[in-house]
Amino acid sequence: MRITEATQGRLRRLNLYSAMPPLLLAAFVVVAVDSRTWWHVVVLTPGVIAALVAFERWTANDIGRVAVPCVLVAAAVWPVGALVIGAPNSYWGLTSAASMAIPRLPRYRAVAAVALIGYVAAFGAARLLTDSAALRGYLLYPTAVTVLVVVLSFVGERFYDVVQELELSREREAELAVIRERVRFAGDLHDIQGHTLHVVKLKTALARKLVHTDPGRAEEELSEIHALVSDTIRQTKELAYAQRRLNLSAELENAKNLFEAAGIRVRVTRVPETDERVSEMLGQVLRETTTNILRHAQATEVRIDLTASGITIVNDGAVGGPPQLRGLSALRQRIVTDGGELTVTTAGESFTTAASFPSFPRAGAR
């Protein structure tokens, strides 16, 4: 499921839980106030049921499947209520159901909104033909309420559109942050291999020229080539397994910039000095955790606590349990080998990554 869909789903479920009780009460009041005999209840009940069904489906983002039948049922109740049984509130079901369906139409939404208002007003005006005192109860109030509800429904739908746009923007920023990390990795790989391969090419050409005229010098060049290639292989392995030397302060600043670019609030607490023996390893943990948060979480806030011999990174938005974090799993083995420990825990939507080296002194320890 996309991030935007998950966010909209939570908002709509919140609407369901918070608005359904008042809607049920309103439906009961409409039927109770306007019904004077049992068959009035029979006539009015389908309209309020149609409104409640439409609202429930709207909160499930599935209003399109029931919009037409709900609106048709509620539309049939209003003229009967206004002209036959004298129920001034029987427009409620139609206004409620249609106001949720119209903003979701792919086109002609304004036309549909005007048609709804005109339909409510027309049968309210028709009541005036038999009841001259019905101007407010059947025409002015129903029409005004319908206009208000339709306007609010468009505003509410626009709110969901804005939420979706913000979530899409945040998702793109997170993807861009991951791409930046990959570009940085590619730059590091180029720094390791580009210069070395160029030197190897030149030395190989020189060795070919010297192999017959100066075999001793050619052998020296070949030995240097072998050493260069061996060193490049070692550095490439270190880069691939996140073992290349890192600057913790630079990693901390980079992580902060990446989170802020993705719209995530960052709070950093650190000691002035970090033990040099663990600084590089903590930088690797921070880099890997930053990538994991951007890829797997729906975080809005990250807290980074850095001590002399440990780091703790806490983020929210850990939906669906902890993901498979292969990078951290590989780092855990190296950290344990060096006498440290790395833990990842979840508590609700909070995800915590903590690495520490208990054998090294904490900040301020004597």
Image (cartoon, rainbow, N blue to C red):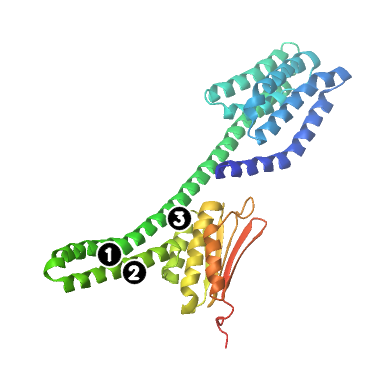
Task: Specify whether 219 is left or right of 332.
Answer: left
Does 103 sit above or below residue 193? Answer: above
What amino acid is labelled 1 in the image?
Thr
Upstream in the sequence, badge 1 or badge 2?
1
Q: Nearer the viewer, mark 3 or mark 1?
A: 1
**How far across and how far down the image is residue 321, in percent?**
64, 53
Distance between the alpha carbons at the discs numbered 1 and 2: 9 Å
The picture quadrant where one finds residue 214 is bottom left
Q: Nearer the viewer, residue 93 or 9?
A: 9
Q: For mark 2, give the secondary structure.
A: helix
Dot 3 corresponds to which residue?
261
Task: Specify whether 115 is left or right of 236.
Answer: right
The reply to whether the C-beta atoms of the residues labelled 1 and 2 are less than 8 Å apart is yes
The reply to whether the C-beta atoms of the residues labelled 3 and 1 are less than 8 Å apart is no
Q: For mark 1, give the secondary structure.
A: helix
The picture quadrant where one finds residue 25 is top right
The reply to whether the C-beta atoms of the residues labelled 3 and 2 are less than 8 Å apart is no
The quarter of the picture where the C terminus appears is bottom right
Dot 1 corresponds to which residue?
196
The quarter of the picture where the N terminus appears is top right
- Label 2, residues with CA under 10 Å away: few <14, some 14-19, many ≥20: some
Q: Nearer the viewer, mark 3 or mark 2?
A: 2
- Label 1, residues with CA under 10 Å away: few <14, some 14-19, many ≥20: some
What amino acid is labelled 3 in the image?
Ala
Residue 231: image tag: 2
Q: For mark 3, give the secondary structure.
A: helix
